[in-house]
Image: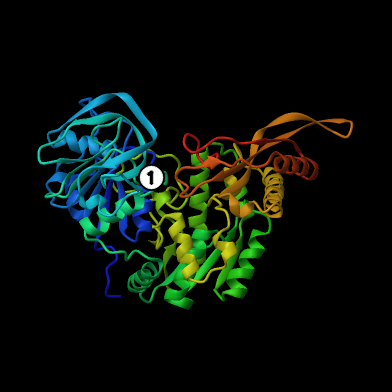
Amino acid sequence: MTMDIHAKRILILDFGSQYSQLIARCVRELGVYCELYPFTLSEKEIRAFAPSGIILSGGPETVTAELTPRAPEVVFTLGCPVLGICYGMQTMAVQLGGKVASGAKREFGYAKVNVQVASKLFQGVEDQLTEDGSSLLDVWMSHGDHVDVLPPQFTLVASTGGSSITAMSDEARHFYGLQFHPEVSHTRQGKRILARFLFDICGCQSVWTPKNIIEESLEKICCEVGDDHVILGLSGGVDSSVVAALLHRAIGAKLTCVFVDTGLLRQNEAKEVQTLFAKHMGMHLITVNAEDRFLSALVGVVDPEDKRKVIGKLFIDIFEEESKKIENVKWLAQGTIYPDVIESAAHHTGTAHVIKSHHNVGGLPEKMHLKLLEPLRELFKDEVIKLGAELGLPHDLLHRHPFPGPGLGVRILGEVKKVYADKLRLADAVLIEELHKHDLYHKVSQAFVVFLPIKSVGVLGDARHYDHVVSVRVVETIDFMTAHWARLPYEFLETVSSRIINEVPGISRVTYDISSKPPATIEWE
């Protein structure tokens, strides 16, 4: 492959906005590679990244205070185009000699922007035209402060009734500021504005495509692995399945997939994995029944982070044991994706808060006998699915709901016991079956049942029962970085609850989780 799809790339500096991941996804969807880092990234790291352009995200702070976040000074001296969004525009203004004030009138939600001066950023972009030929844009605002005085060399480009400076530009230095959010779908022309910045201003090309990503990945895998053999922990989920297909295409028989039956899997999971990958796709698949080992290792373990690490370590132990039975195995492949890295605070800056460690990145021992191979580490979930489709994986597999690496171990709150796992497995199967039956499965993003370590009184027949409680969790999301609880029909929820209580022994009550992410996470642990 002669094309370097990482050569022209965008650096996004995050000031804590809830929309930061959306910026990255929009840039990727436009076919340009980008990476998201905290605003504290050092000058050395920024120069080493060699961005074709920099985007400064929004954020919850105010630049009118002295100790709030600022962009590294190198951002404005590096010589590449810069786009500041909301807080990013405000810190750009202050750092380059302008002024920001707290607004008497806040702007949250829909607004109409009047583009008054020609700018490369808005060329040919409009929702409506005024009688005098000015462009009008329907946008989404979310701010209290506003730029009050433009920095030297900047021009007022657009305004609204509530904010006199909605967009500003320094065309000579290719610096642009937007008070609104082009990355959200409510800004109708947002992607076109971002496209102007990426292609017309930064000189990027739309080469970050599934086909090109696969070609580059195949070359990289072959070069890195050479004559070595690779062992892959195959769970049957989307991420590890796409890794399996990619590696199988790259190195063929040098790949051995190991499926570990932990006793913490969904109903019929082992049989389905064996049928698809061994029989249908012709991969070398080893199945290890390790239920007793995992349940024994989890006795007395209550803390979710401890559970993840116990499960992650045992996974690695088993993989290393199996690798010793196969000649020339030097690599352990994993389905780590970009959100795993972000949420585990595993990127090299080490400045993010740990929300929860994923077993792929947070549960690994410091010393391993195998080298790690993570070909999806740069990709968001939607990119992984597109890659899988390009590789020819079945639609039902690619659009199967995510399942955590630790499995039911983190859907059983508190200590994990076999009897709890068996109850949870049956309850979860009821939920999934009813979602399919009501044609809801592919209309939601993730659905599962959580086992709670509490009991409540119930009445079955004429007898009093004191049994366990489960919670149904169903969410809708685009990128799994934010999510809303699904507004499912009451009749559906009633059917699920009735079936679980009647068909799963030892369950007396079913609740429905109506928490969104943030502040909650999708998984309970």
* Above or below 442: residue 18: above
Residue type at the position of mark 1 = Thr
Going by the picture, which residue comes out furthest to the right?
Answer: 462
* Above or below 327: residue 156: above
User: Residue 285's image quarter?
Assistant: bottom right
Q: How many marks?
A: 1
Residue at the spot of label 1: 187
Q: Position of residue 283 (x, y in %)?
A: 54, 74
Quadrant of image for the N terminus: bottom left
Label 1 crowd (10 A; few <14 / some 14-19 / many >=20): many
Position of residue 316 in the picture relative to residue 2 (left or right): right
Q: Residue at x 28, y 25 (%)?
A: 103
> What kind of element bears circle 1?
loop
Q: Which is nearer the eye, 60 or 295? A: 60
User: Residue 387's image quarter?
Assistant: bottom left
Position of residue 83 in the picture relative to residue 516 (left or right): left
User: Residue 514's image quarter?
Assistant: top right
Position of residue 373 in the picture relative to residue 316 (left or right): left
Going by the picture, which residue comes out furthest to the top?
Answer: 104
Q: Position of residue 221 (x, y in %)?
A: 37, 70
Q: How is the image coloured?
A: rainbow
* Above or below 512: residue 379: below
Q: Is residue 215 visible?
A: yes
Q: Residue at x 64, y 53 (%)?
A: 266
Q: Is residue 344 visible?
A: no
Q: Which is nearer the eye, 195 or 55? A: 195
Q: Position of residue 156 (x, y in %)?
A: 18, 39
